[in-house]
Structures are given as C-alpha cells and as structure tokens.
Image (cartoon, helix red, strand yellow):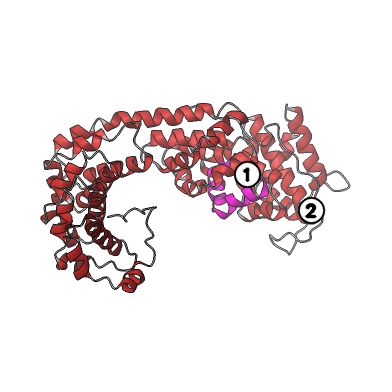
Amino acid sequence: KVNVPQEESLEDSDVDADFKAQNVTLEAILQNATSDNPVIQLSAVQAARKLLSSDRNPPIDDLIKSGILPILVNCLERDDNPSLQFEAAWALTNIASGTSAQTQAVVQSNAVPLFLRLLHSPHQNVCEQAVWALGNIIGDGPQCRDYVISLGVVKPLLSFINPSIPITFLRNVTWVIVNLCRNKDPPPPMETVQELSVLFCFLQILVDTVWALSYLTDGGNEQIQMVIDSGVVPFLVPLLSHQEVKVQTAALRAVGNIVTGTDEQTQVVLNCDVLSHFPNLLTHPKEKINKEAVWFLSNITAGNQQQVQAVIDAGLIPMIIHQLAKGDFGTQKEAAWAISNLTISGRKDQVEYLVQQNVIPPFCNLLSVKDSQVVQVVLDGLKNILIMAGDEASTIAEIIEECGGLEKIEALQQHENEDIYKLAFEIIDQYFSGDDGFSLRPAKVSRGWGWGGSAPCPQPTSSTRGGQTTALGQI
C-alpha cells in the first residue's frame, strides 16, 4: 500500500477545514457526482478525492457506505472527459490503499477491468493513475494479484517500459511489477514469470549504463563535472543499495570516481545522503564490495574537515577500523589510506577520535607487511597522530609500544626503502629516544585519552598518494 501522489495544480492542505467552510457534505458530493452538468460532476468527484487525500484519517469507510463506489467506477468509462476519469481513478486509488476490506470493496465494484482499459488511454496522467490503483490492488495479496493477472495486466505494463516514459511513471510501473512478484504463497503463475523475464535484459542495460557512468567519471575533474551537471547523481546514489550486486558494484565505482574530484564535487555526492548506504556496504558478504567501499571513504577522509566529520557522524570510523584489522589485504590497504588521509585532513579532535576508537594497534600491525607503500602510509599516519597529539605524544607513544608497534618501527630503520627507514628513524628519534640515544619506554600519564591544550600543531606529513586516489580495477 502506498500514499497517493501529490497534484501540483490543486491545493490539498487543510482539506477538512476547507470542506467544513464550504459546508460540503457526503450527501451533496454523492448527489452532485451524478449530475448531468459536467462541471458540477467533476467538482464533486474532485471533492471526494480531496477528502480521501487527507492525511488525517480520510473517511474511506464513510464514502464506501455512502454508495459512491459505483458512481466513481462509472466515471472511469467517460472517455469524453479524461479529467473526470483521472479524478475518479485517483479517488479509487486512495480507497484501494486502505485496509484489505477497503481494497476488496474497490475490486467488487468491478473497477479492475476498467483500470486495465485505462492503461490504453491516450492521456498519460490517466494511464499512470490506473497503474497506481492496480498496484494497490495487486499488493493486497495473491488472490487479487492472480485476478488482475488473469485479466491481462502484464503485457500493457511491459509496454510502458521504454525510453520515452517519464521517470516518475516508470517508477510506478516497476513498483507494480515488484508487487506482481512479491507474494510467494502461492507464487505468481509460471506464465507471468516467463512474461516478466524480458525485464532481465533491462537489468543488464542498467548495469551497463552505470558502468558507462563510472568510465565517464574516471576521466578527470572536467568529466566528473559533466556527469554532475547532467543531474544523474541523485539517481545514482540509491543504486548503492540495489538488490543486484552487479548494479551495486557499478554504482559504487561511479560515485567513488566522483569523490576523487574536488571537495565541491565530493560534496554533491555527500548531499545525496550517500553515507547512509555504507554500513551495509562495509559489512557486505562480498569482500570486493568492502574494498571499494573503504576506497570511497578514503577519498572522503581526504576532503575538508566538514567531510571528515560527516564520516565520523555516520558512525563509519569503527567500521573502517574493523576492516583495517580483519579485512583481506586489499581492503586493509584502502583502510590504511582512509586513516592516514584523516590524520592529514582532520582537526585535532577528529584525530583524537581515531585514537579513542583504538586505531593504533591494527594500524601498527600493517608495519610488518611487504608492501612498501602500505608501510609508508602507516608510518606517515602514525607520525601525524604523534604530531597532532602535541604535549600528549607520550600517551600515543605508549600505545604504540604496548601493541608492538615500536619494535616494528625499530626494525624498519633497516628497511631497503630510503623514505621508510628515514621516517622510521625520525619517529624513533623524536618520540622514543632519551638523551643517551637508547629507546625508552615513554612515561605514563594520568590524563587518559584526552588531549589538552589548543596550541597549534606542526603540519602533518603526507604519503606519495596525496589527498585523492585513483580508481581500482573493475570488480
């Protein structure tokens, strides 16, 4: 069951007060709805529809008891008056969106064959309203579904799926098709399933279209802006929660490429509530989805401080840290970038939040991997955290030592990569060595996690990857 659509040309707010002011009664509506005057008749049917459109307990049962259903059904036959057909169809749609008994009342009034007939109306608004009504009826259960199927609903529905159909109309059509497939006790007839199999090619078209967008957004900031200017981003983001993994994957790559652009381009994606999709993506059973999701977030944490805060507010940092600790190596690598980028872009309190979420132990664990780039990213991140901690650096140093990180950093002073051994030496020299040059356990502090003071910090260091990232290979 769904809410009825909003009509732009009519003011439907405060319906009850409006009708009381006009002293309009159900009896008057019923009488005028059978008037020979087309203006009076249309006004009465429209009045009934407005009552049924009220957000505050629409009087569906009262209207059914008044005997208006046969009148509304007769109006569906008035091909000479499409406005009357539209208003009557809308009113019946509202009734069918109620309880099962109310839906059955519409069915028993013999409205369904007329709704099917209206699918062939030359007036699009009439067609669309008939589709909406049928969707409510089909959604009532298997009995109504099979009845509507028996009258031949599938073929006209499929005929609406074409490039010229407006997106709102297409959504209604696909919603009805979903209702046709929804109930499985019993499932829809096999013949219906076979008829609907043509939609599988549309799924592939969707997948291919979204991949095309991902290729377009992989061509630099100018092409990213062209895609943004097309207005497609608000339609692209919801596909991150599509039931088909192929669609999710393509959409994730496309939005991921967009956030490799400027902060302004990244914000366009964030404004579409994109982060709400990421708890599911970060816990997806497919590891490659996890990897791409963390890659996406690594580009958000490379943005401005407001964008970093958006990731924190969405509750995603603990999930990134979980992938840092437990993901496969490709995902861990992206998580290392996400954390390191945050230490570059984030404010002091944002970096402190990372530490509070226990990021340091899994971060340090990656210091022993063979991938030199990952090792350098982690060293950069650790150094940035130590720099940002200021007077509280000894607290961070203690955590690093207690989780075995110090031992790993000491070993990296012998690394074959010059940048790595220099960076390891700098960290040891600045944060772990006493005057005699020997490594020392940092002094305990009683302040716990909090970092006091507001003195300016030295500029954090960045790895060779910089702020934004390049796309991964297609998965």
User: Which residue range is magenta in the image?
Assistant: 297-323
Provide residue 103's location: percent of width, then percent of height.
18, 57
Which residue is depicted at the point 64% across and 52% down?
354
Foreground disc of the pair 2, 1: 1
Closer to the chain start, of discs 2 and 1, is 1
Residue 462: in magenta span? no
Percent position of residue 62, x then y: 20, 69
Residue type for callout 1: Thr
Say which quarter of the image contains residue 177. Answer: top left
Of 136 and 8, the residue lying toward us: 8
Q: Tag on residue 301? A: 1
Q: Is residue 151 left or right of residue 440?
A: left
Q: Is residue 365 above or below residue 223?
A: below
**Residue closest to the far right:** 435
Q: Residue at x 55, y 47 (%)?
A: 271
Residue for badge 2: 390
Q: Quadrant of the N terminus?
A: bottom left
Residue 277: give x, y in percent of width and height: 47, 47
Q: Main secondary structure of the magenta part?
A: helix
Q: CA distance from mark 2 to mark 1?
A: 22 Å
- Kind of residue at disc 2: Gly
- As for residue 303 lying within the magenta part, the answer is yes
